[in-house]
Amino acid sequence: MASVVARELGQLLLARGEHVTAAESCTGGMICAALTDIAGSSDWFERGFIVYSNLAKQEMLGVPEDLIAASGAVSEGVVRALAGNARQCAGADWAVAVSGVAGPSGGSAEKPVGTVWFAWSGPGVDEAERCLFAGDRASVRSQTVDHALARLVELIKEQK
């Protein structure tokens, strides 16, 4: 599914003369890979940030250490900061950010395995959402990529 949605995303961005960036934690570059699998993506994909560790989130995208300490890396505040800062750092029109617990370990009662926070930033858009996906690590990560891109397409279409 990611390739179909990524292709649609690329067509939308190209038609609008806009660019996208991604900040990824739990997916470790899978969103960027889905986008760059599309021939010609250099016309609309700016760059990606793989911010797997808390230190990377702080150093690469300026997420405050105290925000991570207070809420955890898998939280609304952190993904909102990732998306907004990635968009600004990249000079992109749109950004998507993800942080989650893909498993098989690392979950808690509050944030069980499969918990993923998403944020999207764009012209007039500042949205975050928490999802809980079922399945193994590969499945959680795949569902994360699909949801991140599908919602981004929806948000861009709403801007027409």
Image (cartoon, rainbow, N blue to C red):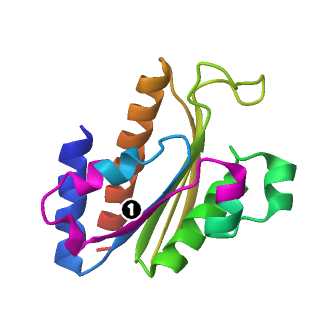
Q: Position of residue 20 (x, y in %)?
A: 36, 69
Residue 32 falls in image quadrant: bottom left
**154, above or below 43, in the image:** above
Please give left or right for residue 155 compared with residue 25 in the image. left
Q: Residues within 10 Å of mark 1 (few under 14, many from 20)?
A: some
Which residue corresponds to the image point at 27% horizontal and 42% vertical from the top-left?
Answer: 2
For image coordinates 24% across by 48% down, the residue present is: 5
The image shows residue 135, relative to residue 70, as above or below, that is above
In the image, what residue type sits under mark 1? Leu
Query: Residue 117, can we see it?
Result: no
**Quarter that holds the C terminus:** bottom left
Q: Is residue 22 left or right of residue 42?
A: right
- Residue 24 visible, this orientation: yes
Work out which residue is located at the far left of the displayed protein and give it: 39
> Which residue position is annotated with label 1?
155
Tell me if residue 43 is in the magenta stretch: yes
Question: x, y (%) of residue 141?
Answer: 45, 33
- At horizontal 22% and vertical 70% (from top left) the residue drawn is 42
**Image coordinates for residue 4, horizontal then vertical, percent:** 18, 45
Q: Which residues are magenta?
A: 34-56
Q: Residue at x 44, y 38 (%)?
A: 144
Q: Quadrant of the N terminus?
A: top left
Residue 54: x percent and y percent? 71, 51
